[in-house]
Image (cartoon, helix red, strand yellow):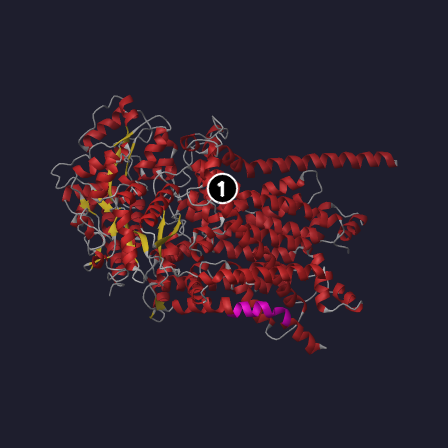
Amino acid sequence: MKRLTKKLLIASMTVLACLGLTACSGNKSADTKDGKVTIRFSWWGNDDRHKDTLKAIKAFEKANPKIKVKAEYSGWDGFDQKMATQISGGTEADVMQINYDWYLNFSPKGEGFADLNKYKKIIDLSGYSDDILKAGEINGKLNGIPHGENTRVIAVNKDILNKYGITEYPKTWTGWEEVAKKLPDGYYPVEFSTFLDIICYITQKTGKSFLDEEGNINYSQSELKDGFDWYQQMVDSGVSPSRKWVMDTVGHDSIATTKEFLNGKLTGFFDWTAVLNSFSTNLKQTGMTLDIPPFPEVEGAKSDGAIKKPTMLFSMSKHSEHPKEAAKFLNFILNDPEGVKAMGTSRGLPVNTNAQKILEENDQIDDITKKAISYSNATKGVMESRYMELSQIATAYNDITDSFGVGKINSKEAAKQIITKVNAAVKQVKSKAK
Amino acid sequence: MKSRKRYTGLLYLTPWLIGTLVFTIYPFVSSLFYSFTDYDLISKPKFIGIANYVEMFTSDPDFLNSLKVTIEYTILTVPIQLTFALFLAFILNFKLKGINFFRTAYYVPSILGGNVAVAILWKFLFTKEGLVNQMITSLGGKQVGWLSSPSNAMFVLVILGVWQFGSSMVIFLSALQQIPLDLYEAAQVDGAKKWTIFFKITIPLITPTIFFNLVMQLVNKLQEFNGPFLITNGGPTKSTYFTSLIIYDNAFKNFRMGYASAMSWILFTIIAILALVIFKTSDRWVYYSDGGNN
Amino acid sequence: MDAETINNKVRRNHLINATWRYILLIVTAIIMIYPIIWLLGASFKTNAEIFGSIGFLPKHFDWSSYVKGWKTGTEYTFATYFLNSFKIVIPKVIFTVVSCSLTAYAFTRFEFPGKNFFFGIVIATLFLPAVVTRIPLYLMWRDFHLLDTYVPLILPTLFAQESFFVFMLVQFMRGIPREYDEAAIIDGCNSFQILIKILLPMMKPALITVVLFQFIWSMNDFLQPLIYLSSVSKFPVAIALKMATDASSGFVPWNQTIAMSLIALIPSLVLFFSASRSFVDGMSAGGIKG
């Protein structure tokens, strides 16, 4: 037994020594003597995205032999905590993929990241509209460059609708009520249950986004109440299933992996264009196709009701020791034909029109994405505020919508609570920027 | 002699002492300090006195509600889980052929832990036309809305908590294994009945383990995170919004580390008080063979 | 009654008993395991089939999910990630057993000033949610220049910093009468020999439990490695799994996800199965003699 202890001790010491040796590399970019510079690029995503991004990095390293790019990637789970600890410790990567709503937390005054305006000579921004670039701007400083644009759409199972004799998509919500009548019992033409979907309707009526850039509510209480009433009417007339039904059927998960969607009972739904791919792939496996009908119009509409937001953005660390090389890399993946082709569409379609052309010529865009683009291009839409999907604010309105959906509160109370609770949440967030 | 023994005890404790000083004291004290500050992770913490503590008790109904539902969950889960674990450990301690297979089988759900597969699995079981509802309807019952009603959602989480009873079971099992065989033999010679042996010999001898599992399960369940995070996301209407979830949301989603720290210290205090009560009463029901008192 | 009838009766009783026990064991096992069996079936299905049907037999057996899942979309295969996991887990297990035994020994067999206070600290460290110590710990390891190494994951276990195991071993050690120690002292053992020769062998089931739990929990832990490691080449299995299941960017190959979840279980299962056998060995070998 004594011998064993001794052995264990020796083994432990050896392991510790080994650990000590590897410890030196640390988290800083280690530059080699031959003038090679290392920059770090961090992102989250699934396997396809990793494959494509790694390809782009290889292409970049080939074109720029003096720069090495260290890839730091993982899945979405836990990424928020990793990012927060890194930002808090000043150890973040040189180039990062960032979520739209993180900027208010990481960079409330626009000083959390490098100002990309300084690197305009290296990064070509000609393919971006001023509108979309604004989404990455805080206090006049370009904190991030949006990668893609997301539009809230209705998507439907074309085969089911055809099967029950609906060959032409209705142009109004009353038209969808007719569709609901034609479908058998237990079928729902358009599922919606989130506050964002109600917002689409109110946006169309008022032509304004829910929150402005400063986080102020643009809607009156009666406009909000009208939105909730409309939602209730859609449920009552069988266009959408009830919130309760959705909770029990979909759970805290995606509709794309829900039985009722795959067997066609949930014929259509509201979602962002960037995620349609997964729906269409899953549906294809059951032999059906996904389609995007035009967005129904209400009487006296002031806009087309398409809410838009950037998908994700790319930022650079303000602590970067090699900002020029980092900017060069960023330009490569955003604009260079080699980089764009390698990056592909695993992050959705880029909003950069130059990149779009490259992908189109190279035939890298799938059907549902093409449909989504033509839809997005045909709508003017309203850009969603950065505040909209911020956790505190989203928690507030989702909770109220749930309470309304399960019948705990009526539409008047819901509208009232939206105003007080969202305002309180915005105020809380803004106290940071002071 | 006595002073030498003192010195020996501390000697054995040295690794722990060093480790605690280096690795534990600092983060603990930091989080206590943060709890009195406004700390957003990017700028320096700003001292604000007890404002965080005042806020959570005066203007944050979600926090008080989270304490309520977490305690409810704990009270429901811990006794069921421990009884179940002890019962199965007792059965699995039998000398039967293939007992290893059963031991492993029962432990599998606990290895799965907070794995993503659990989320898929739970969806398969508890959605509208999931396995559980299909079984209910085939027995002539009505479909149950598992996730839209607060009490049902809680029930689903309790079932998940109980299903993952494996760790407690294994600890009970190893306690049962440590009982000297001759004690049983002596009892059998005296002609004692099985249940008498179980309650008069087995249970008293494993009270230290029961005590351990009770404390640990209380600690774990009061900090339960995976279940509500993976399956209900705190819903419906915050009925399963547990304290650890609200702490996580504030720390890493809302970037209010100061506030999250203050909540954590309240949770710390609650668990500490409960643990203290259990420790104090343990003199009366926990039997240690070494005869000493800690 | 003569001896033979008694014997027969006992045997029959025994048989009935065993049957009942098996029935009980099997029924419970089915309830516990059916979901896992369903997962196994699901790993061979297509996405649409996984979420569309509740039977566990797939329409076609398709091994490709295992092959594709093993390859991953990263620069490395699961082989690398398994190896990394072992590099983390094995030292952790060894250190935990050694350091926690020493610590538990100190708390159960010795008197020293501040003992109750120190034990209070051991227990109290379990009460604070880990979420709020994450940032200070990260900053600490940054200042030690040990980020992106396995040290932050392993080193604390060398210093008995996992209170769960200390507490557990304390409880088990207190279950051993002190008469054994005293007898050993008379035989001329010093305090370390008492621990090694007397106490630890008697605690074999508990020590095996420590090994099992530390192994399984460290295999499953993904958040700590994710925070401390930034090089993908150093990631353990648990992170690789989460990467394979990422839903943030559209399509998720669930069959691969489930396949890999199941494969990731194998080391823990094998270890558990063999350890569970040594539970029995420990008993029949008479490791505990009254």
**x and y percentages locating residue C89 in the rendered image:** 55, 53
Q: As drawn, which residue projects farthest toward the right? A: C2
**x and y percentages locating residue A202 in the rendered image:** 18, 43
**Most common SS among magenta residues:** helix
Does residue A216 show up?
yes
Helix or strand or loop: what does disc 1 sit on? helix
- Residue type at numbered disc 1: Ser
Q: Image quarter for residue A353?
A: top left
Q: Relative to A131, does residue A251 appear above or below in the rendering?
A: above
Q: Which subunit holds the residue at mark 1? A: C
Neighbour tally class for label 1: few under 14, some 14-19, many 20 plus, Cα within 10 Å: many
Figure quadrant of the N terminus of chain A: bottom right
**x and y percentages locating residue C278 in the rendered image:** 69, 48
Q: Relative to A197, does residue B37 appear above or below in the rendering?
A: below
Number of numbered discs overlaid on the protein picture: 1
Figure quadrant of the C terminus of chain A: bottom left
Work out whether residue C270 or residue C205 is closer to the camera in this orientation and state it.
Answer: C270
Q: Which residues are magenta?
A: B11-21
Is residue A47 located in the magenta-colored stretch of the structure? no
Work out whether residue C266 or residue A302 is closer to the camera in this orientation and state it.
Answer: C266
The residue at which mark 1 appears reads as C261
Left or right: C108, with A182 as reference point: right
**x and y percentages locating residue B71 in the rendered image:** 46, 55
Q: Relative to A273, does residue B56 appear above or below in the rendering?
A: below
Q: Relative to C90, does residue A179 appear above or below in the rendering?
A: above
Is residue B14 located in the magenta-colored stretch of the structure? yes
Work out whether residue A95 or residue C251 is closer to the camera in this orientation and state it.
Answer: A95
Q: Residue at x 42, y 39 (%)?
A: B146
